[in-house]
Amino acid sequence: MCVTGGCLCGAIRFEGDAEPQFQVTCYCTDCRRTSGAGHAAMMGFIDGAIHVTRGAREFASKADSGNDIVRAFCPTCGSGIYSRTAGMPHLIFLRASALDDPALFAPQLAVWADRAPAWDAVPAPLPKRRSAINRGSAQWR
């Protein structure tokens, strides 16, 4: 899959030719707040498969899972670009909202689904988890 995207102002771009390991919507408090919506939509790729231009500003915090997480944003326009978590250090999570072709995103799972606000309910056919993805699960490696 050819993946391209970037921020609103065009200062940050990413590209790669790789298949996502998984695609999720996350309803945790941090993802809701950093996305400005009821959830964040992300695609997990093997680190190194996606090239991101330099210049993104990274912010570190502790995720609801307890893992350290870094979220990257454009310092000019504030668009979310990617995140990385210590729980899955071999992956980079691209924000689906930053894709040039949003049709590439096809969520497979909703995490922290019990935190979904009523006005942004998890779609019925989407499998749901009450917490983060289990990093030990072979399904998500």
Image: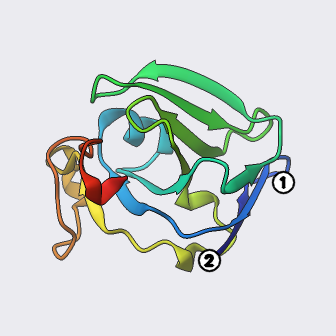
Q: Residue at x 54, y 79 (%)?
A: 103
Q: Which residue is mark 2?
A: 1
Total numbered badges shown on the rendered structure: 2
Element under disc 2: loop
- Percent x, y of residue 25: 35, 57
Quadrant of the image for the N terminus?
Answer: bottom right
**Disc 1 residue crowd, few under 14, some 14–19, many 20+, Cα 10 Å:** few
- In the rendered view, how is the structure colored? rainbow
Q: Amino acid at mark 2?
A: Met
Query: Can you identify the residue that label 1 sits on?
Result: 10
Residue 76 drawn at (x, y percent): 80, 36
Depth order, front residue of 60/75: 60
Give the quadrant of residue 50: bottom right
Q: Position of residue 107 (x, y in %)?
A: 37, 68
Q: What amino acid is labelled 1 in the image?
A: Gly
Residue at point 27%, 62% (across, down): 109
In the image, what residue occupies the spot 23% across and 43% down? 134
Of the pair 56 and 49, the residue shown nearer to us: 49
Q: Is residue 7 visible?
A: no
Image position of 127 (left or right of 55): left
